[in-house]
Amino acid sequence: HEGKKVFKCNICDKNSIWKHAMKQHVASVYEGKKPFKCEVCDYSCSQKSNLKTHVASVHEGNKPFKCEVCDYSCSQKSNLKTHVTSVHEGKKPFKCEVCDYKSSNKGHLKTHVASVHEGKKPFKCEVCDHTFSVKRNLKVHVASVHEGKRPFKCEVCDYSCSLKSTLKTHVTSVHEGKKPFKCEICDYKFSEKCNLKTHIESVHEGIKPFKCDMCDYKCSEKGNMKQHVLA
């Protein structure tokens, strides 16, 4: 594309050789304009092609791109490529400059920095005090916590949850006994890396950032503090 003018976003580092693509980016990301609405659910987007992909994958179950290593399938070739490079090849080129977080997706890194290091969580629950950095996480929270919707059910026991990935973790850890994340200090093992990190910080490093306003109780997780206060 030599000699072609590049249109740059004034807010982030996004750029495009197409003026209409940049206008769509600004309208959808920063102005919240998403004129294409799904007739089945409340999903909306800025491009007609994205709506078609959503309907085909979510409501019609069309996920033609299948992973040759595991049972993952998706509706877009680019998503399969990202899955293979990050999950099976371990390539996560986008690194956080503050902590050891890495991602295969630049957008995910930006969300991580904004929510974890800058404390930006603009999506607020109208029922409780929970805030989120991503709108879809708020939707999942409302559906599961306040509406009791847990569509993903375990075939072995009566466990149910709001996310497919959470069900997968449940099955592998509880029913298959897979806990690949091992503590190097003690013999504890975990099914998720985040749980191992919490364990090391609270048990071995003594980091307990959540403090009770009424007594000297401290803990490493906000949920535990809530339970303590209610008790």
Image (cartoon, rainbow, N blue to C red):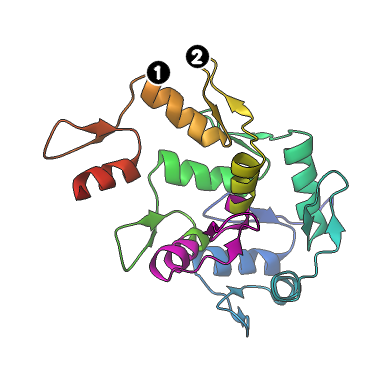
Task: Look at the numbered disc 2 and give the secondary structure of its residue.
Answer: loop
Q: Which residues are magenta?
A: 138-166
Q: Position of residue 189 (x, y in %)?
A: 55, 27
> Magenta stretch: residue 160 in it?
yes
- Residue depicted at x 18% and y 38%: 212
Which residue carries the number 2 mark? Answer: 185
Image marks 2 and 1: residues in contact by CB distance under 8 Å: yes
In this view of the protein, which residue sits in the foreground, 141 or 151? 151
Q: Is residue 133 above or below residue 193?
A: below
Count of number-bearing discs: 2
Which residue carries the number 1 mark? Answer: 204
Identify the image quadrant of residue 88.
Answer: top right
Q: Is residue 158 left or right of residue 208?
A: right
* Mark 2 → mark 1, Cα distance in angstroms: 8 Å
Q: Residues within 10 Å of mark 2 (few under 14, many from 20)?
A: few
Q: Is residue 112 left or right of residue 171?
A: left
Q: Position of residue 58 (x, y in %)?
A: 69, 70
Q: Which residue is most to the front?
A: 157
